[in-house]
Image (spheres, grey):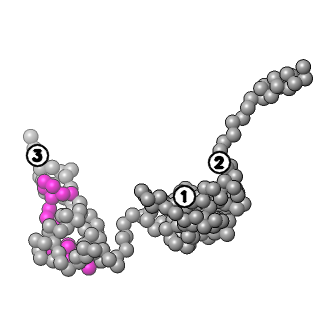
Amino acid sequence: MDIENNDEGFFPNLKQSITKRGLGAKPILESQIKAAQQNSNSAMEAARVLGISYNTYKKYAKLYGIFEDLKNPNGVGIKKSFGPRKQKYPAEELLEGMHNHIPLWKYKNKIFQSGMVPEVCSCCGYSERRITDNKAPIILDFLDGNIDNRHIDNVRALCYNCYFLLAGDNRIKIKKIPLRYHLDEEENIQE
């Protein structure tokens, strides 16, 4: 039996990379950590740049004595860069009527969180919040009745009571009564 020796090691399919941690992982070098620190604003971001967990980054940075260089325990002043959906649709674009494909609940949360639309009933001024989760009972009403027209001029915030009084309860589906039921009633009336 001839075993080929192509410097692949005993396990040819095992690739050594920085993201593989555990048994057989290569240690992270001081130069790699310094390069990641130069391209980062915080220790957490440096760990993401390296593709490792924060605890692994912290272990090696403390080992080399360079952990304190980017330490920011409060995270003050640093905008989180991860999470592509965090800032995918800015509130300004939503209020201009763009991105109508996102769910209505996300749209409502975004425009209220931005502060551009106050979370207060535009009719009666109701703004009380629930104690348990700090949510306000506010519904978005579209003036022209088209929920795809999400321009700021077409949207108003209403409490449940004002929504019921002004817009009606058009979200309730009315059961359709079969046609034969109506015909039976007409026959009974004629008799």
Q: Position of residue 81 (x, y in %)?
A: 37, 70
Q: Is residue 20 left or right of residue 158?
A: left
Q: Position of residue 56 (x, y in %)?
A: 18, 64
Q: Is residue 83 magenta?
A: no
Depth order, front residue of 162/100: 162
Q: Which residue is mark 3?
A: 3
Label 3 secondary element: loop
Q: Quick check: 20 above or below 173?
A: below
Q: Which residue is mark 1?
A: 137
Query: Disc 2 or 1, which lies upstream in sequence?
Result: 1
Label 1 secondary element: loop
Q: Which residue is mark 2?
A: 171
Depth order, front residue of 178/184: 184
Among the 4 quarters of the image, the one containing residue 133:
bottom left
**Does the image show residue 94?**
no
Q: Position of residue 132 (x, y in %)?
A: 42, 56
Q: Quick check: 111 above or below 20?
A: below
User: What amino acid type is highlighted by mark number 3?
Assistant: Ile
**Does the image show residue 33?**
yes
Depth order, front residue of 97/48: 97
| Distance Cα–Cα, label 2 vs label 1 | 16 Å
| Distance Cα–Cα, label 3 vs label 1 | 72 Å
